[in-house]
């Protein structure tokens, strides 16, 4: 798990699965190793 905020709810957990697809605002961004560079999201900011 990659994160910048300094914590992760699943830190230390071992997973036996992998991510096959990722959606941002309803648009497919990642599909089985292929990244769609045209889709942009917004940076998550922690206050």
Image: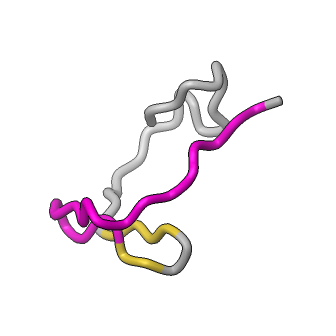
47 on left or right of 36: right
Q: Is residue 34 magenta?
A: yes
Locate the N terminus by quadrant: top left
Tell me where the magenta segment starts and ends, as one range: 29-46
Residue at the outermost top position: 6
Residue 19 or 38: which is nearer the viewer?
A: 38
Number of numbered tags placed on the structure image: 0
Q: What's the residue at 35%, 52% (across, down)? A: 16
User: Residue 44: where, in percent of width, then height?
Assistant: 64, 42
Q: What's the residue at 55%, 73% (across, down)? A: 25
User: Residue 43: where, in percent of width, then height?
Assistant: 58, 43
Locate the C terminus by quadrant: top right
46 on left or right of 18: right
Residue 26 or 38: which is nearer the viewer?
A: 38
Determine the image quadrant of residue 17: bottom left
Prevailing secondary structure of the magenta residues: loop
12 on left or right of 38: right
User: Residue 8: where, in percent of width, then height?
Assistant: 63, 32
**Whether residue 14 is situated above or below residue 37 in the rendered picture:** above
Residue at the outermost bottom position: 26
**Whether residue 29 is situated above or below residue 28 in the rendered picture:** above
24 on left or right of 47: left
Residue 12 or 8: which is nearer the viewer?
A: 8
Q: What's the residue at 60%, 38% (across, down)? A: 10
Determine the image quadrant of residue 11: top right
Q: Is residue 4 magenta?
A: no
- The colour scheme of the drawn protein is secondary structure
**Whether residue 37 is situated above or below residue 43 in the rendered picture:** below
């Amino acid at each position: 798990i990659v994160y910048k905020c300094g914590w992760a709810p699943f830190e230390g957990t071992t997973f036996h699965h992998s991510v096959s697809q990722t959606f941002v605002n309803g648009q497919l961004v990642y599909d089985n190793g292929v990244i769609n560079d045209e889709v942009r999201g917004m940076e998550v900011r922690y206050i």
